[in-house]
Amino acid sequence: MRLTILLVVLVGCGDCNDVEPVHVPPDSRPGDAFGCPRTSPCNPLTQAGCCVGQKCTWRLDAVMPQYIGHVSCAPDGSAAVDEPCMYGPPGVLGYDNCKKGLVCGDYRGGTGVCKQICDQQGGAPMCDAQHACVTYPGLFNTGDTTPSAGGVCDVACDPLTENDFDGSGSATKSSSTCGSAAEVGCYGYPSLGSPPRTSWTCMPERNLTVGQPTGLRHRVQCTTANGCADPGPTLYVNSCNQGYLPLLRESATISTAICVALCKPLNCYAGNCGPANQNRLGEAPHRCTSPDRVGTFDTSVGGEHCRFIWSFEIDDQGNFLRSPSSDTLGFCFDHSKYLYDSDADNVPDTPYPACSTLADGFGSGVFGAADLGCVDTTHAQLMNVPPRRFDDVRPLSNRFMTTR
């Protein structure tokens, strides 16, 4: 039984509106423009490979007609964490003024702040408890097939309290970790079981005023026509309005990406779904329905459900990469819009069953509540995920996601 929920192509965006970089190999020349002899590329994580007074950093080669950069040594800077920074003009002077071990958040040449470099695989250097290690596609990265050489520490946040779900302004946010600016929200994306683990960080909303009051919210298509996507189309973590992610394709028959609402999930399975099966919608005030969220919601029993995000934190080998939000955050998923192959003929033909009809845990030959993310990791007993259930636990029969 193979599920066919389709994730969408997604890249990240730091202090800028990002574009995909073209491939430029790491600088491995025997010397550099600053007279330092060396025999191998430098390492931005360990800061090895550069001479005294230098740092291993991201160098800006060109902005137009294409963005090009590479990892290399450059003179050490003087700006500390969170202090203003800027890159020099592309070319020999295309490096920032941050201290060794830091990098400027705006790596396109504008003004940003210095951020700590971190190891996105969980090694050293690590971010502190108030930050999370995230990767940007145009920073320490030289192409789609080249893993990032490092990430940066962004301010960690709670997407349920740091987002303006209704678009009325920052006054609707219940905490201020990300500050009071209306255009800054809390964004992230499920890890799919590969490091870095799922994290949520403060990030500018790319489309604060697009299409208000409906906006880029639940089940609204994310396209170039409405400004949600760049040509390609290229989608970003922060393409949709605050509290909504370009997470899924619209349906089993429509491949266009849609914005999907975040929610606070509750356990829901047969005989344990709350009065009138209301647990399926999540916990107020973060339910998959109005007025908690904005958009189009099918609130019938077989429609919308607040699905635990852990169900998209498992890789194709069954490895679960737990995060702090695995059991506390979910996304609104309409069971009626997606199909599974019920008769093993490789043709999806039947909508996913409602959580309230499924037995607790994983099913045996049929769906269980855990197969569709209807219950938390305790009920799912994730230490004992059956290997034969890979496609059910992490439904990526067509995988289109890139790194953040």
Image (cartoon, rainbow, N blue to C red):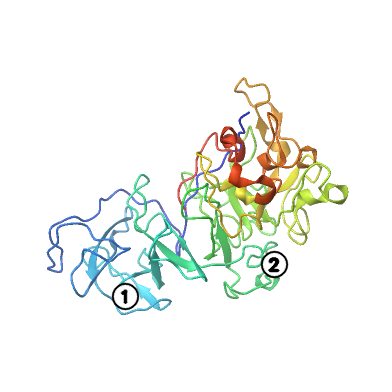
* Residue 241, image x, y percentages: 61, 58
Which residue occupies 35% across, 72% down?
Answer: 86
Farthest residue, direction top: 345
77 to 286, vertically: above or below? below
Q: Is residue 360 left or right of residue 63?
A: right
Q: Is residue 302 left or right of residue 200?
A: right
Asked whether residue 277 is in view, the answer is yes
Give me the residue at 65% from left, 37% from top. Answer: 251
**Alpha carbon distance from label 1 to label 2:** 39 Å
- Secondary structure category for the residue under label 1: loop
Given the image, on which type of amino acid does mark 1 rest?
Lys
Q: Disc 2 residue type?
A: Ser
Q: Quadrant of residue 38?
A: bottom left
Q: Quadrant of the N terminus?
A: top right
Q: Residue lying farthest right?
A: 276
Q: In front of the other: label 1 or label 2?
A: 1
**Which residue in the protein does label 1 denote?**
99
- Using a 10 Å C-alpha cutoff, classify the residue at mark 2 as few (fewer than 14 neighbours), some (14 to 19) or many (20 or more): few
| Secondary structure of residue under mark 2 | loop
Please identify the residue farthest to the front as the structure is shown.
Answer: 384
Residue to which mark 2 is pinned: 168
Q: Closer to the camera, 347 or 38?
A: 38
Neighbours of disc 1 within 10 Å: few (<14), some (14-19), many (20+) = many
